[in-house]
Amino acid sequence: MVNNAVCAIAIGYGIGACIALQRRGSGREGAAVLLLCVVVAAYCAPVIGKSMPTVESAYKRIYGPISSYMLEKLGIR
Amino acid sequence: MQEKVSPGAWICLIFSFISGFSTLFLQEAKLLEQDVWLSYLCGIAMSFGVLAVLYLAQRNYPGLSMTEVFDRLLGKQIAKICLCLYLVYILEIQGAAFQALTLFYRTVVLPNTSSGQIILLIALTTAYASSLGLGAIVRTVQVLLCFFLFFMLVIVVFIYKNVTINPFLPLFQHRAPEIAFGGLLSLYFPFGKSIVFCFLFSRVTNRKKLLPSTLIALSLSGLYLFAATYLSFGSLGMNLVQSVTFPFFSAIQLVRFGEYLERIEIMIIGIWTVFTLFEIIVLQFVFMQVFEHIFALKHVRALALPVGLLFFAMSHRSFVHQADLSFYNFRIGPFSTLLPTVVIPLLLLLISLLKRGNRSGEGGPLLASSDDARRPRS
């Protein structure tokens, strides 16, 4: 429920702010706002949101083996 | 017109940033027990060392902000990649911060509220606060710090009355590898987070007092964490500290004032929450600064809401289970923090020293040609 609301707000705000900023002559800033809002909407979308990669999942995959090896070498728990 | 921060305000800001969350889980204390003071000292020393390294790297470019120094030292493209790494680092620690705060609130105060609602509320509040600018943030910190210190002092005095065992003895019961890992844990959380302040170095009015102020702030937050840890040991005992999720709050719960005022921790939670929010506000502010530099944007207030919602989205999808957070904080975080917190600053210092040596004519031919090529453009 919260996710769907944020997804809708993000898309609406992104499009609105992008148009308003382009009218004011800040086209780059408008594009940046729209990019951020699209990313937010992707993360909050009902189906694809759950499978989007997060920093936690990416780092777990990258640093997990290093961490297990180091902790084993240090002899901690 | 960029708002400037005085050295005293800088101390207050760093102290609030670190001390908000530092007493929440006391993870190193659970690992090292009485010897945890060694890991705190290591964490403070390493964090100060990293900030000093970045200050030294920036010394050759006095008028520039840290993001511009990255551009000068690394070249625009590599600097963009490194700064993106720092954006990812900010997203990492803010995700853990949001979920830690939400976990605390759902455990202690609001068990029937969904985590999404709490995270959204925090995200919107902090997005608005970070859009007000550094001057407003710093002034708010200075006002609220008095209340925080007053309440914490009162609580510390009353917890001290509950202390039944000597929390300092026996000393040196743990092996050197465990203490080293404890130092790494302290670097990951809470002291190493202060690296984000390198992006605000250019905002301090008196550059000569920057490093001493940073050291004072780190030491004071270390002192506060030390007091909270050993008071928890003394009043709860070692076994209870290791088994409860929030040891310091359990120690506060034992405090009684007179005959009637029993649930004093509710007031402390209110004050404490405001300080944890300061960490998230500063993270959002720095995120916006770095993001604006990477994409060469002018500062617009319209960016504040999308950044806040990005923080919400990323946090809501991370650390879904409580065990994920403790697993990440103990096993992944200490290693993932090394790249942005240690490796990149040392790399910057090395390049800065090589460039300075090269400019004075002592360096090798390798850097001379790239410097000559760069000179006409800058």
Image (cartoon, coloured by chain):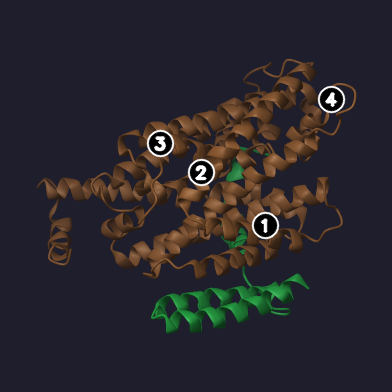
Cα separation between marks 3 and 4: 38 Å
Task: Quarter of the image for the C terminus of chain B: give it.
Answer: bottom left
Is label 2 or label 4 in front? 2
Answer few, some or many: residues within 10 Å of disc 4's Cα (few below 14, many 20 plus, some between 14 and 19): some
Chain letter belonging to callout 1 = B
Look at the image and give the colour of chain B.
Answer: brown
Residue B179 spot, x, y in % from top left? 58, 31
Secondary structure, mark 1, is helix
In this orientation, does residue A67 appear? Answer: no
- Judge by depth and name the residue closer to the eye, B265 or B228: B265
In this rendering, would B285 be left or right of B82? right
The residue located at (59%, 64%) in the rendering is B308
Earlier in the chain: of badge 2 and badge 1, it is 1
Cα separation between marks 2 and 4: 33 Å
Q: Which mark is residue B139?
A: 2
Q: Which residue is mark 4?
A: B256
Q: Which residue is mark 1?
A: B122
Q: Which mark is residue B7?
A: 3
Answer few, some or many: residues within 10 Å of disc 1's Cα (few below 14, many 20 plus, some between 14 and 19): many
The residue located at (68%, 16%) in the rendering is B170
